[in-house]
Image: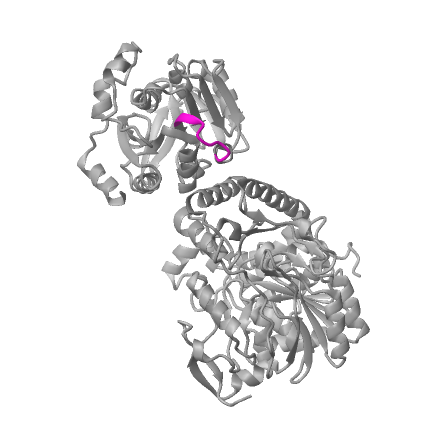
Amino acid sequence: MELWFSEFHAPDVKHSIRINRHLYSQKSNYQQIDIFDTPEFGRVLTLDGNVMLTERDEFIYDEMITHVPMSVHPNIRDVLVIGAGDGGVVKELTRYDTIEQIDLVEMDPLVIEACRIYLPENACRLDDERVHIYYDNALRFIRKRHCAYDLIIVDSTDPFGPSEGYFTREFYGICYNALRDDGIMVNQQGSPFYKQDAEAMQRSHQRIVNTFPISRVYQAHIPTYAAGYWLFGFASKKFHPLDDFDAAAWNKLNLETKYYTTRLHIGSFYLPAFLEKMLEEVE
Amino acid sequence: MNSEKKYNQRRAPIYEALQQFRQMRVVPFDVPGHKHGRGNPELTAFLGEQCVSIDVNSMKPLDNLCHPVSVIKEAEELAADAFGASHAFLMVGGTTSSVQTMILSTCKRGDKIILPRNVHRSVINALVLCGAIPIYVNPEVDVKLGISLGMKREQVAKAINENPDAVAVLVNNPTYYGICSDLKEIVKMAHNANMYCLVDEAHGTHFYFGDNMPISAMAAGADMASVSMHKSGGSLTQSSLLLTGPNIHQGHVRQIINLTQTTSGSYLLMSSLDISRRNLARRGKEIFAKVIEMADYAREEINAIGGYYAFGRELINNDSIFDFDATKLSVHTRDIGLAGIEVYDLLRDEYDIQIEFGDIGNILAYLSIGDRMQELERLVSALAEIRRRYQKTSKGLLSQEYLPPEVVISPQEAFYAKKKSLPLEESIGCVCSEFIMCYPPGIPILAPGERITNDIIQYIEYAKAKGCSMTGPEDPDILYINVLDTEV
């Protein structure tokens, strides 16, 4: 018997992972949550049938969405993380002693519950005393905060489901308003490869450009995401991701990483020609 | 009234007949010519085979809307039972056709009808068709919000006393903004004076199903009510219900409907009415409880932003605001220095949020069965962002005032009279022969037969400048207006 999990990366492209065991399956108020055990990728978390993370490649995403802003802004104390119920981003953030507070806003308590049980390696730092978990709609949470954070990390699902609201002009606007004058917002920006993803990426980039004075896009290679090619948005009120990047200071922290390096930091902002063109179209 | 045993609200006779019709695989040598979609593959691909295959003509197993005897008749009886009416007519020409039927069924040429001036254009259109004379009851205006309120009892009594020969009183209940009049008392006053009471209840379908709702027209004893099932009831656009009470002759109303209604009534529209009625009868109470809960939440959150005023039940004053429809999410925007229409445009252009309408001082977001909290959070956040980014001083913003009309001749006479076209600013003092309105909400600023004044022209210019979508006149740019050629 063969068991496979498949996900459409585009209407005519399917990505499949062989399954050992289906460990968890629940429908929450918001989405269908599943966790699989797989031979190649270890445990795999899917929401509404879309791969959120695998044990094998989560480090790429979690390191890139965390260390890039952390090495640019010299004094990040208060951080807000949106989504990220799996705990991977929090795990990276808690490695910085200088961070005093991490607010995590996740709408779905069941995601956190499932990850604590089935993905303990990922969720292990959710109990850090600096972490405060809020089960709330992020729009509602953020619009009541003003000048409260140095960094906002938007770790959402793709823009075609319950996270649709996290790719909107109003969302970026209230994030801007919730950040201090030198604050940074980093978001997962989707993939530029398949048509539907590319269009959504362009739309959200345009909205960020219209909201923040500095807005750059950087990339990473993540095997289980669409086209294996993923983008992040770096939006900022003051700091430029390359001009204000302090490699020496970050290297002094001696944090061990598997993907991120200060050389890669610079390289990740150098984009292929077709992508530069797509971004320029909406800037 | 009909016993509950007799009517089973789990039935949907038109829907069931169409299901059966599909299974019979009847060979169509009749219209429509697309033949279950086969003749128009692009349309079928777009709308879906399920949909086009029931776009069929009247036939024996499916009844005939012009003269219902079987499944349509049963669907109408079920609807009447669900709405507490003596009879219900399925309408396929929008609530406009329901409103026109109410007027054409009760008024003849030269008859007087008492009505508030803030009626929908369809009411005055019906007066153009039948030649009845409008007797306007000036609605009270909330000066701060700049909206017309309900009809005051005293004003209705005065109009009835001054016009004992009027044949009907028409009430707009609730208004677009959710304002209700003292319907029960107005019905009583009309009936005591031997007049019919007609209710434009386009925005009140849910009154028949939700808990703690304002009183519905049929419960208040009105003779006829027009109910936009496609608004809060969930049926397809253009479908509507006309409800009648015990004093109205069903056959006469059917004749009036058949004067103007299509003989090819759409089964898509009729089945949508049937299925929606069934849904409301079975689940309406919980559905509208949820809508009110969402609207109350949104009001609280919007009012917490500051500057905006999302109004609600606190407005109730026992007369001109006898009751308030809490499902309506109306927000006053002038205090952030923006006209409602400006906020409406910003929501669409900057935030991809389409709301129902914006006028000079307010916006209205329509909440219904289909809404979810996550979209409400977007709306509230977008309003917070609009305030942060665009807030101005409200100095210089016009407040919307009620401009009492001077009716010089009947709408019909004015509409068909010899006329000439004048530039707006030169038309002051003339009698208008056409409509001018902002759409939505579609309440005329000027109707045929009314005197054009300086205030009215200023208001039109202001609304145009703020970006209101103006309709009505022959001149699409609203630079010219048709007026009566002769001095009146």
Q: Residue at x 42, y 44 (%)?
A: B389
* Residue A139 visible in the current orientation: yes
Front residue of A33 and A75: A75
Residue A228 x %, y % = 28, 29
Front residue of B144 and A74: B144
Asked which quadrant contains residue A51, the reply is top left
Assess whether residue B165 is covered by the magenta stretch.
Answer: no
Residue B55 x %, y % = 50, 63
Total numbered labels: 0
Residue that lies at the very extreme toward the front in this rendered image: B395
Assess whether residue A146 is covered by the magenta stretch.
Answer: yes
* Image quadrant where one finds the C terminus of chain A: top left
Residue A3 x %, y % = 40, 24
Residue that lies at the very extreme toward the right in this rendered image: B192
Q: Residue at x 42, y 34 (%)?
A: A175
* Residue B161 placement, left or right of B238: right
Residue that lies at the very extreme toward the left in this rendered image: A273
* Image quadrant where one finds the N terminus of chain A: top left
Front residue of B307 and B103: B307
* Residue A190 placement, left or right of B347: left
Residue B337 x %, y % = 48, 51
For the stretch drawn in magenta, the main secondary structure is loop
Q: Which residues are magenta?
A: A143-152
Q: Residue at x 39, y 71 (%)?
A: B477
* Residue A283 placement, left or right of B248: left
